[in-house]
Every structure is written in structure tokens, then in C-alpha cells.
Image: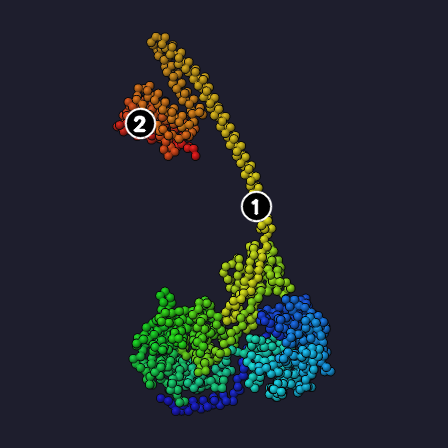
Amino acid sequence: MGNPFRAAAIRLHVCLALAVAAVAPLRGASYLSRAWQTGEGMPSNVVNGVARDDNGFLWIATGNGVARFDGLRFELFSLPDGLPDTQIHSLHIDRRGRVWVGTRKGAAYRENGTWHIPAGVPVEQIYSLGEAQDGSIWLGMYQACWRWAEGKATQVDLGDIPADTRSFLDDGYGGLWILTRGHLCRWHPDRPGEARSVPGPWNGYELRQLCRDGEGRMVIAGTGLLLRQRGSTWEDLGESMPGGQAGPNLACSAGPNGELWVATRDRGALVLNDGKWTTLDSTGQLSLDDVRALVIDDDGLVWLGTNGGGLNLLRRRPFESFAAKEGLGRTVTSALVIDRDGTVWAGTDGAGIFRLQNHRFVPAFSYFEQPDKGLIWSLSTTRDGTLWAGTYRDGLLRIRNGEIERLAVAEAGFEKEVSALHEMRDGSLLVGVQKFGIHRLKDGSFDPAYRGPEGPEMRFHDTLEDRDGNVWAACGSDGLWRRVDGKWTRVGEEPGKDVLNPVALLEDSGGDLLIGTLGQGLVRFRNGAMTRWDTDRGLVSSTVVQLLEDNGKNLWLGTDAGLQRLSRDELESGIRFSGIRLGREDGLPTPQFSGEHGNLCAKAADGTLWFSLASGAIHLDPKDFSKAPRAPVVRIDSAATDSGQLWDRSRPQALEQIEVPAGAGTLRIRFTSPEFVAPERVRFRCRMDGLEKEWQEIEGARTVSYAALPPGEYRFDLMVAGRDGSWNPKAATIQVRQEPYFWQRLAFQFAASVATAMLLATVVYKWSRRRLRRKVEALRQERRVEMERARIARDLHDDLGASLTEINFLGTLAGVAMEAGPPRDKVLGMVERARHMAKSLDEIVWTVNPHNDTLSSTVHYLCSRVRESLTAAGIRCRLEVDEDLPECTLDSQQRHNLLMTVNEAVNNTMKHSGATEVGLTLRCRYGRLLVDIVDNGKSFDPAAASAERNGLLNMQRRMESAGGTFQITSAPTGTVVALELPLTLPK
């Protein structure tokens, strides 16, 4: 069991540690600081006044003009903007939001974007500015005190005292306290032209400023003097100041927590809180000890203007930080637990165990004997007062009554990593051992029946027992395990998704299991269902390694990118998280929280929270974060194009509409939002309504550009999200009008449309006339052709036909008169040839004559010629013709080819078929003329006949040239010649 010598050594070490802690200085208030000088854009390092307006912007009076600051950019106002001088001595923002400055050559105030010189105020150095309850502005000069009200300036009589006015303070009763270099005076509106000195312990001192402390008591600061009102008497605070005396105190102000701040010439800033002073100077927090201006704004930010060190910002760290100088050394804090006595214990990865004593961590025990010890991976306390420590390769340690006992973990032995500890409701201890499962230690021994989950490389990061008695184990890449009725099962796996990678477990007040993971965000297990939240919902990181719930049921997440608070409502809603976020800019020594071991964070009995860091630990009170942060303010500053500036807020012009000239190029709109703690966290989103439907988010920039904006009317909307991620629902808007080019204007487009229409009408008219002339000329030409055809037909019929008829008649007479013999036969042959020529001539005349171009004429002629030919040959003729033939025309080529084909078919029938009957059928179907020639003669092979003679081939070619078809079929019952010719039917 325990070694008595070792226990004695431990007791001695503990006593020495307590003694050291007892004489250690008390830890003072912790403040974060930041400074801005000319290198960061300040117009001058001499700052004489600071004020913050209602929109959150900071105004700074410097030795080179006055600047407005949004956290990133300084906007300077100087002589060209209307200031009477660049040497600014004092600064004040009145109830109407006007910015007043006192310069070396008089005063000026800014209203509606313009600087104005108040009428009647002397052109002298103005060292102080103030305001009474009636809204009058007070101006303190070296030799006079002036009051400016309703546009008029009047000098206030201070009696026979020097009028070197330094400060003004509302007395709370409608009057005003006036502090001069050596006197305190009081003014009342009943006697507006005078103020009288009030005697007191301040007489004979060089006085500088008036203020009220957190309880409303008046404070007077001066060289060698710091007085605070106590009823009807005054309390001298100078004796309690560091060094036992009041030095040159230049300014004073009340802090947000009731503390009193004092700005000094040679000792920086002094803070009085609960009767104790804290010094903030150039040794750590300030850029210079000579502080001339002191202002504490509504956000609790302390602004200090120095005489050559620029602008300083101080703010109280929102938590206690414990690192190397607070005793935790430089190693990783790998475990943290609070026992039932409220003692905070911290385990480190290489420096052993520490305990918190008097705001400082001190070594709790000496280093272990072996050189590789001191690696603490988990801590836990049990109800009997025992402190348990899980180590790296040194097993489990039981520490009680000043003795350390090393325990072997069941059959796992000593040389194992104990990474998770948890006390169960029955007082037993769950012990997670890497690669050897979770074991239960009860009454000093391990339960051999309690095992699992087991695996060859199973790792254990955290474990707990829920309110139903089930045991959970976070096993990293091996998933989430649950023990129910003695059986371990892996739960929470989703089909098609990666195995859950849990490292931290928490059962919240509602009974839900919350799970922190490596790279998979935050997971909630409720009634067998899992819900995940990741960076797309607003988590600062997808790696969550520590989980705590405060008394307000808010969830605190320690990640590898800082600390985040989420409310239950945020988790249940579908909107982006906007909870508090703490990072390096808030004073975290590192944003990376310790992970992958159990027992890394704890909640104290008073509701405060402790978290482990990669270098130290932090302690915070959730109640300090109950105040809602100031809603971020967004402002549109200017608009410009490639051609120059269009609008600037600093110019005296109304923000009604931005007119963008045509061809001006890309429109660039610049905007800002005042944020001084973490300006890089500010996010913007904008939308050009009329061009865009969706918001576009902007991070890291404060300008948005629109190239080639179409002509029209638009509204530019701009929203901002603060460093907590919440969007201010109030958007800044500005109307934008993109002017069109002259050719894009309605009048020009109308004129161009009319001109185009007229031109088009002219073109169409001329084209129509030309087309009409062409048609007329074509008709004339066609008419001339028809007339010529008719003349040719007449001439052929009248001249050549008559001659052939005469030759036929004379030849017939000559043949009859001649005796039989060769001469007579020749004459009769000539007669027959003339008769044949007359017939051919008749066909030609019929073809050429334009009066025969109709379908009905063609059908009639075909029928007459076929009947004439068959009758002459002694063959019976049968004709079938549709009664409702359409009225359409056939050109001469179609009629000629059709006639020749029909004649050829009839002649072949008469010569070769031996038929006694021939039928001619003419029909019109589907816009085609169908002609069938059917005989009852003998059959033949069309293929063989085509090879021997050209008749059939000629008929086919004639029909094809006419655009039709030719088909012949022969059977024992006869032969059928089928012709098809397309018709041009009237519409």
C-alpha cells in the first residue's frame, strides 16, 4: 500500500507549497489591451479627447484633426472639411448627436454631415466642453467661460476667480458644476449669466476634471488631489493611492462595475475597486504612462488617450486565465476536477497534479519517482474524499489522507493508459483503460464481471452513467458505445455515413446525451435519434472536445478554435447559431482547448465553469455574460465608379439616391460597422434588390462591386452580423439609379423603332413593288408564250394541217385512178404516211395549244384518241372516267408525256396482245391522276420484253420526266398498265 517515507515527503512538499502561496501577491484584475498609433492610421499620437456616438463610432481629438474610427479605419476631418484648426484640445457629443470640438482657434460642431462654426464664440483656445440639462453647450477657455444656447453665445461671469475652465458636470438639479484651475463653481439656469465659487478642500490645488463614481458621488481630480464626495463632506482618496499620495491626476471616470478610473500624467491609469488600487501602465497594458483622456463607453470598453502614445483600449478579461505565471507551467492541462470541498485540481501532461490556492495553482504532490511519470490523463473525486488520477503508463493512482497508492487495473496491469474516470451513483468508479476496456472499481477492488467494450486498438476518451443507469463510452474512431443490462452495443451509427468519432460526453438537464466529436461537430442523442450541428449552422469548429451546461441551461463548447455558448433555443431552432464566442482576441492564451482525454472541464458549486487549455486553464462565471451585446450598426459610407466618386457620407448631401452615369464603369459601394474588440469577426451580407434575389455574404471586405449594372431603379440593402454571429434585422438601404446610354433611353428607342419601322416599310414596299413587277412581267411573258403557242397551233393546224389534208385527198384520188401495181401502192403509202403525219400533227397542236392545259381537256382528248385508235383496229373500247375531276392545269410537258405513254400502251396492245377489248380508266385520288389501261389479251414477261425492245423503258422514262410513275403487270387474263401523275390542285 502506501510508503510512509514517501507520504512524509508529500506532506512536506504540500506544506511548502501552501507557504509559498500564502506569501504570493494577490492576483489583480486582468485587463486586455490594444493600442493604435500613426502606424495603424491614427492622424497623431497625441490624443486629447475621446467620445463614442450613438451609432457606436469612436471620435478622437488629436493634435492633427479629429478622427472617426470604426475599429479598422480612421476617417480624418481637418481644415478642408471646415474645422477652424487642426489642434484639437477637447471633444464632446451632445444630446442631439452633434460632435463638438474645441480647437486652438475656436469651436466647431458637426451636424448633418457638415462642420459648422457656432456664432458668437470667440476665436480662442478652447480646453473643455460640456452640456447642461437644458441642452446648452459650455465652452471653457483660458480667460473666460462661455455658454452657447439657441444659436447665441454669452459669457458667464465667474466672479473674481480666474476663469481658466477645465471641466463641466451636470449637478442633477438642472444646474451645472464648473471646475476651473483652482476653484469649483456652480451655475443655475435661474441666473444664466453668472456662476459662483463654492469653497472646499480643493482650494489651492491645480484641478483638472470632475466626474461621478459608480454610486453617483462627485469626484474631483487634480494635481496632488483626488477627492470623493461623502454626504456633506469630502473623502481624500489620494492617501490610499499607490505610493501613498495623489500625483498629477488628469481625468477620472466611473467603470461599468462601479470601479473608479483615474488617468495620470506619469503613472498610467489607476483603478480603485473595493478599496484596492490596480495600476495599469506601460509595463504591460499601456503604450505610454502620460494619459490625457479617459472615457468608458456603454460596452464597458475603457478608452485612454495618451500624450504621444496614441489611443489605448482596455477591457476586462471576461474570464480568469491561469497559465505559467499563475502556476500551471507550460505543459498541457490534461485533466481538471473540483472536489466536494470546492478545491480545483488540475492534471498536466508532464508536470503532475496542481491545486488552486489563493488564485494560484501550486504543485499538489512531488513528481513521481520514475522519470517518465507526471503524465496525468484523467482526474476524478469520489464521495469519500478520495482523489483518483489516471496516468499515462503508470496505472491508476488513489490519493487520500496524504498518501498515494498505485493500483493495477484488473488484468491490464500497471503499465497502461488510464484516460477516463467517472464516479457512478452507487459510489463505484468507472475506469477507462486504453485498449483494455472500461472497468468498475468498487470497495477497493475491480469487478471481474464488468468488462468491455473491447477491441485490439479500442481507445477511450470519456465515459459517464446516465440517469437510467446506462453507461456510455466515447471511443473516438471506434464509435459511441452503450452498456445496457450488462451488454455493450455500438449506437448512433447512420447508414451511408462515417462512423461517429466521439471524444466528450455530457448528459444535460433534459436527459439528452450531448456528444462532442473530432471533425463531426456537436451531436445530440435523444430517444434513439441523432441530431448533428456543424460549422454550417454556426459552430466555431467541427471539433468539440469539452462540454458543460451552466445553471441557465446554456451549453458551453470547448473546441480547437475557441469557446462558444449556445442556448437551448438556438439548438432547437433552424437558424444559424449566434451565441457568445471567445477567442484569442478575448484573452485566451490559445484558442485550442485540451481534448481526447476525459475530465477536462468542470462546473463548481457556485455555477462557475472551468475549462482546460493546451496551455493552462480558464475560469468564468456565466452570469457575466448575461448582458446582451450591443446590436451591431451598419452604415453605407460612399459610392464610386471607375469615373470617380458619386456620393460620400461626409459630404453635405442627402442620401436619397445614387445616380450612376451611363458608361461610368463598375459601381463600388463602401460600408462599415463599428467593432473594436474583434472587427475581423464582423460579417456583412448585401443584396441589390431588382438585380439579385438572394443575399450574398461578405467576409473580410467592406466594399462590394457591381460591374455592368443594367439600366434601371434598384435598392441596395446591407445587413451586418456582430462578433457573436447574430444579424441585426435593421438593414441600411440606399436607392441606386443606373442611367442608360442614350440608345437605351425610351425616347431614343421609340424614335429608333419608328425609324426602323419606316425603313422596314419602305424596304418592304420597294421589294413588294419589285416582286409585283416581276410577277406582272412573268404573267406578261407567260401570256406572250401562250399567245405564241396559240399562234403556232393555229399555223400548224391551218397551214400544215390543210396541206397534209390536201396531200391526203389528192393522193387518194390519184391512187383510185391508177391501176393496181407498184406505182399505185407507193401512192397509197404516201397517202397513209400523210394521214399518220396529220394525226401526229393533231396531237402536237393539241399539246401546244394553251387552251388544252386543263385536266378535263386532257382526259377528254385521251378518251377520244384511245376510242378512235381501238375502233379503227376493230377492238372494243371501254371507258371509265370520274365525274368529279378537279379543276386543275397540266403543263404541256406533262400532257405530252402522258399522251405519248398512253398512245404507246394502246399501240402495243393492238400490235401484240391479240386482245378483243381494252379498258381505259381515269381517276383522281389524293392529288394524283391514276390512269389504268387494261386488256384481255395474252400475257408476256415484261422483263424479257424490256430487254428486247425500248418501248416499255421509254414509257417509264416519259412518266418519270413528268414527275409520275409507270407500272405494268401481265397475267393469263390480260395486261394492266398503271400510270400515276401528280396534280397541282387549287388551294
> Where does label 1 land, which residue?
753
Q: Residues within 10 Å of mark 1 (few under 14, many from 20)?
A: few
- In x, y percent, where is residue 723? 52, 71
Q: Position of residue 527 (x, y in %)?
A: 36, 71
Dot 1 falls on a residue whose secondary structure is helix
Residue in front for this viewpoint, 839 or 606: 606
Residue 905 picture quarter: top left
Residue 557 visible in the snapshot: no
Name the quadrant containing residue 529. Answer: bottom left
Quick check: marks 1 and 2 in contact, CB under 8 Å?
Answer: no
Residue with the most extreme front position: 190
- Residue 814 spot, x, y in % from top left: 38, 10
- The answer to which image quadrant residue 834 occupies is top left
Q: Which residue is mark 2?
A: 934
Residue drawn at the location 39% of the way across and 71% of the way down? 524
Q: Name the amino acid, label 2.
A: Val
Going from the N terminus, do you reach mark 1 or mark 2 first? 1
Residue at the image point whose x is 68% and y is 68% from the top? 116
The kind of residue on which mark 1 rests is Ser
Q: Which residue occupies 41% across, 69% down? A: 532
